[in-house]
Image: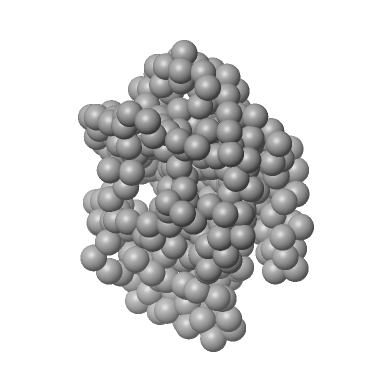
Amino acid sequence: MKVLMISSDPGIHEETQAARRMEEYRQLVDELYTIVIAGRFNIAAFFRAYREGKRILGERGAADFLITVQDPPDRWVVGWLLAKRFGVPLEVQVHTDLMSPYLLRESIKNRFRLIIAHFIFMRVMCVRVVSRRIERSLAKKYPRLSGNITVLPVYVDIEQLRLVHRIEERGVFRFLMVSRLTREKNIELALKAFAKVVNIFPETKLVIVGEGPYRRRLEALALKLGLMQGKVVFTGWQEDTTRSFQYASCYVLTSNYEGYGRTVVEALAVGVPVIMTDVGVAGDIVRHEETGLVVPVGDVQSLVVAMRHVVEDSYMRRVLTENSRKAVENFPSKKEYLEAYKRMWYTCSSKKIV
């Protein structure tokens, strides 16, 4: 079996974790070829990717090939055109909750992408999604996809994270966020809620790990809210976030939409209590007042109540810590995960587009 992967991650061609992941995938098949369409999508990038894909399929022979394409949906068009031209199966990978109304409202670009997604979903016969939430929404919108959707989350090394020893500093309660600093992550919501919480509990801090185009805007908002005097810390990007999880008292995610929420799963594995908006794994892995606290998207007051609750109630924190570890204890090992990935690809290899 041969696989042509069209990705939006430039890291797969560098010395990164993504590149190491590609090498693991390469061991699953006879041949694996990768094409990257990174950054803003444009017509030139589209044609370059198409020409490269056509060259690979032509030189290596299209027989036994599977094309797999990662979102956003505009990248799917390249895969679909190649699959149509060479008569090979196509798998689309969905890492984003495309059916979220918040994604639709965010930009005209997202509306255009949803039009493309609709076109592809009406034709493709193999879809990989990263959460049950996405599976349910796609199966409801596109009944033809029922039985053709594989739920395979992003891999998280649970066993390694369970070895992390949490350190609780006396007199400090540290909220942690690990995120790209972008619009859809809605970190403004966390800052506004934290500004109310810190007035009641001055021992609290908010640590924000990550980089992105919204950093200056978020720092300006924190300053406006009077939070920059050691109360809110922007650490920038970190290759290893283990130490941040070690010292976290509570993990917070405030996204408007998420496909999965890998950092939430990492927090659960370490045993850090989680507060998150109703996105991604909320409702499936993070169940309200059982394995975490779930609040409505964009609701500042509900977030304030949840943050106050987790600071005040030490018994609840202990329960959440215990339950959170149990929630992820049966996650697959790396070997099991790669075996599932291989099964998915071989299943897809028999399903051509219509």
Q: Kindly indicate the quadrant of the structure image that contains residue 262.
A: top left
Residue 125 position, x and y percent, is: 60, 49
Residue 162, percent from left and from top: 28, 28
138 vs 41, left or right, is: right
> Which image quadrant: the C terminus?
bottom right
Foreground: 338 or 19? 19
The structure residue drawn at horizontal position 50% and vertical position 74%, both measured from the top left corner, is 39
Q: Residue at x 58, y 33 (%)?
A: 200
Say how the picture is coloured.
one colour
State the residue lying farthest toward the bottom.
44
Give the quadrant of the N terminus.
bottom left
- In the rendered image, is residue 87 in sight? no
Q: Would you say 169 lies left or right of 4 here? A: left
Q: Relative to 323, does residue 70 appear above or below in the rendering?
A: below
Q: Nearer the viewer, residue 161 or 334?
A: 161
Residue 337 percent across, percent down from the top left: 34, 37
Spot occupied by residue 203 in the image (x, y as percentages of width and height): 45, 35
Q: Residue at x 69, y 54 (%)?
A: 103
